[in-house]
Image (spheres, helix red, strand yellow):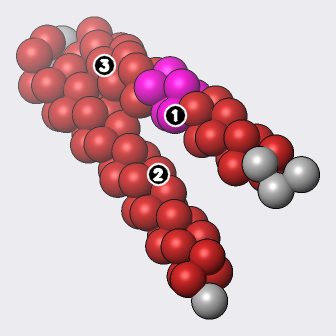
Amino acid sequence: MSEEAPKKSIFKVILEASALGINFVLCVIIGAILGYLIDNFINTFPIFSLIFLTAGFVAGVREIHKFVRKVNREDGQRNNQENK
């Protein structure tokens, strides 16, 4: 029965990681669309598109960083519990 808990956590991590990839792509796409719409409204084409595209990319990277920190923290706690 102790083998089932790690399997569930592995599947949970895989599910979260795949959702993370979708989240990253959506951040970039939403940033690009918002920038394009603002540029279209103000007639300053590349400026806001690039700014919001970069902001979407940074938001996506930030989400990946948060996920990696969370997984490392959980893994460290699991290792500490196994060592006791």
Residue type for callout 3: Ala
- Give the distance between the C-alpha atoms of the residues marked 3 and 2, in whole angstroms: 23 Å
Say which residue appears at 82% left-offset and 45% top-offset.
4
Along the horizontal axis of the image, is 9 left or right of 62? right
- Give the distance between the C-alpha atoms of the residues marked 2 and 1, in whole angstroms: 8 Å
Say which residue appears at 68% left-offset and 34% top-offset.
11
Q: Residues within 10 Å of mark 3 (few under 14, many from 20)?
A: many
Can residue 41 be seen in this snapshot? no
Along the horizontal axis of the image, is 51 left or right of 7? left
- Give the distance between the C-alpha atoms of the residues marked 3 and 1, in whole angstroms: 23 Å
Give coordinates of residue 15: x percent, y percent.
64, 30
Q: Earlier in the sequence, mark 2 or mark 1?
A: 1
Part of the protein shown in magenta: 17-22
SS for tag 3?
A: helix
Q: Quadrant of residue 25?
A: top left
Residue with the mark numbered 1: 17
Quadrant (top left, top right, bottom left, bottom right) of the C terminus: bottom right
Front residue of 39/17: it is: 17
SS for tag 2?
A: helix
Q: Residues within 10 Å of mark 1 (few under 14, many from 20)?
A: some
Residue type for callout 1: Ala
Q: Earlier in the sequence, mark 3 or mark 1?
A: 1
Up/down of 25 relative to 84, above or below: above
Answer whether labels 2 and 1 touch (C-beta < 8 Å): yes
Q: Earlier in the sequence, mark 3 or mark 2?
A: 3
The furthest residue to the right: 1
Give coordinates of residue 81: x percent, y percent.
63, 81
The numbered mark at residue 67 is 2
Front residue of 72/46: it is: 72
Residue type for callout 2: Phe
Residue with the mark numbered 3: 32
